[in-house]
Image (cartoon, rainbow, N blue to C red):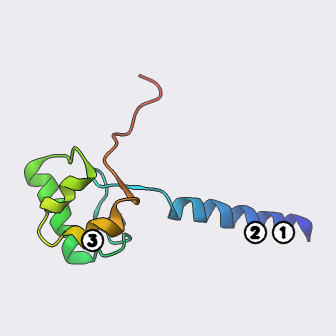
Amino acid sequence: MFKELLLTVLCILLLSAAAFANVNINTAGVKELISLPGIGLVKAAAIVDYRTMHGSFKAPDELKRVKGIGKKTMDKLRDQITVDEETDPHP
């Protein structure tokens, strides 16, 4: 009984940690982008298209350059997105 409870708690913690992880807007696909508040299929596709045409975002606020992403959407997203590059721990 205790092992089952412990396993359940561990699973919940792992899943909740993933839910609060920042989304890298330079590497995220449509499926990951639509998990963000205020981002539906059309805006997610616009983000990917913009990134393809203009290259990586240098700062999260550059997302406002994408059609359909305004101040209100950015206010919702600011703490949930990143542009950090993944670093290889073994260069």
Camera-nearest residue between 73 and 1: 73
| Amino acid residing under circle 2 | Thr
Residue 4, labelled with which disc?
1
Q: Where residue 55 sits: x, y (%)?
A: 14, 46
Do the residues under discs 2 and 3 have CB atoms within 8 angstroms?
no
Quarter containing the N terminus: bottom right
Camera-nearest residue between 54 and 78: 78
Q: CA distance from mark 2 to mark 1?
A: 6 Å
Query: Of discs 2 and 3, which sits in the foreground?
Result: 3
Question: Does residue 7 show up?
Answer: yes
Do the residues under discs 2 and 1 have CB atoms within 8 angstroms?
yes
Give the residue at the far left of this rendering: 53
Q: Where residue 90 sits: x, y (%)?
A: 46, 25
* Residue identifier under label 2: 8
What residue sits 20% from the left and 58% below the top? 63
| Amino acid residing under circle 3 | Thr
What residue sits 43% from the left and 56% below the top? 22
